[in-house]
Image (cartoon, rainbow, N blue to C red):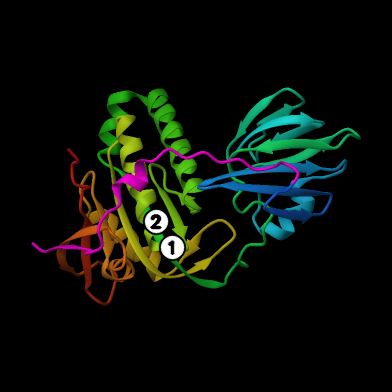
């Protein structure tokens, strides 16, 4: 067994220090115009807050879809309506109308449009990191770090809990996963029934996301295994594909409960970080032509 650790000292004090921040609503960090509206963005560390102004006649499927290049809005929204009215609709017919004085939550996979002749102003506290920003076109290949999660003993747990309780548990676990995705600037590619496939443009953020959802899921009584790999993927409108995707799913299958396994490719990108890993040797992965060296993320040392 080999344990490697970056020689740079950990700055524990910095991670635990309290932080205060403030910004003026009159001076957003970024303004993203789109047809019949705009999004104003403020960043406070890992938190992104957005003010969305939707003019009368605005509809997501008409005005944002050409930019997003997805069939529906694939962002989780948690917001507060200041003025105007907005209606949301999912492909299966679920609808919701919101107006002034209301707070709301909407999961990915919806259309939305303004009702009436008054502009709708919304403050959104989720899903705003890349909302209304042009995405990579469908079919284009990009380099990404991929995270694949899987619930340990999901079938046995579903049988033990029953259908209704299992659905509620999955919904709650998916919701917390999406919150952490937004926090660490990840992008959901697809859900897998009891897991998620997501991409990141930074390997270290992908690992921090993985450790965050491991702990948060355990608090719900859900144990995860997680695989991480970096490689080229082809972005489709609602998914990703490529050898890298097959590789990360094979890696995930080899992980035990509570483990984060990363490929040698991802491990090499983390050499200048303070993360520690344990070598798990070289493995032949089904369907992958070359052997892959795997590394397990080592637990954080206990303080005290």
Q: Is residue 117 above or below residue 299?
A: above
Residue 300, horizontal then vertical, whole percent: 22, 47
Question: Badge 2: few (under 14), some or many (20 or more) residues near its Cα, within 10 Å?
Answer: many
Q: Is residue 73 visible?
A: no
Is 243 drawn above or below residue 276 in the view shown? Answer: below
Q: Residue at x 56, y 41 (%)?
A: 21
Q: Position of residue 219 (x, y in %)?
A: 32, 30
| In-image side of 227 versus 234 (left or right) | left
Quadrant containing the N terminus in the rendered view: bottom left
Query: Label 2: which residue?
Result: 206
Distance Cα–Cα, label 1 vs label 2? 6 Å
Q: Which residue is mark 1?
A: 202
x and y, in percent, of residue 54 in the image: 80, 42
Residue range corresponding to the magenta coloring: 1-26
Q: Residues within 10 Å of mark 1 (few under 14, many from 20)?
A: some
Q: Which mark is residue 125?
A: none
User: Which of 89/22 is in front?
Assistant: 22
User: What is the secondary structure assignment of the residue under circle 2?
Assistant: helix
């Amino acid at each position: 067994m080999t344990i490697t650790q970056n020689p740079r000292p950990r700055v524990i004090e910095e991670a635990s220090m309290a932080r205060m921040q403030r910004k003026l609503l009159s001076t957003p960090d970024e303004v993203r115009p789109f047809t019949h509206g705009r999004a104003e963005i403020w960043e406070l560390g890992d938190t992104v807050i957005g003010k969305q102004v939707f003019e009368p006649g605005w509809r997501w499927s008409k005005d944002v879809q050409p930019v997003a290049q997805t069939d529906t809005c694939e962002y989780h929204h948690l917001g507060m309506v200041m003025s105007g009215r907005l209606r949301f609709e999912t492909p299966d017919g679920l609808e919701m109308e919101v107006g002034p004085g209301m707070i709301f939550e909407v999961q990915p996979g919806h259309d939305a449009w303004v009702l009436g002749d008054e502009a709708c102003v919304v403050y959104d506290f989720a899903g705003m990191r890349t909302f209304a920003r042009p995405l990579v076109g469908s079919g284009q290949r990009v380099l990404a770090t991929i995270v694949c999660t899987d619930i340990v003993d999901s079938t046995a747990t579903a049988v033990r809990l029953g259908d209704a309780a299992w659905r509620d548990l999955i919904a709650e676990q998916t919701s917390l996963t999406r919150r952490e995705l937004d926090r660490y600037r990840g992008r959901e590619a697809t859900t897998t029934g009891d897991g998620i496939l997501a991409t990141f443009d930074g390997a270290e953020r992908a690992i921090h996301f993985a450790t965050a959802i491991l702990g948060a899921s355990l608090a719900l009584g859900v144990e995860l295994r997680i695989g991480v790999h970096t490689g080229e993927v082809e972005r489709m409108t609602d998914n990703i594909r490529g050898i890298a995707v097959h590789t990360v799913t094979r890696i995930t299958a080899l992980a035990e409960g509570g483990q984060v396994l990363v490929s040698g490719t991802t491990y090499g990108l983390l050499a200048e970080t303070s993360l520690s890993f344990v070598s798990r040797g070289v493995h032949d992965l089904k369907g992958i032509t070359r052997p892959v060296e795997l590394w397990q993320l080592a637990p954080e040392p206990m303080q005290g």
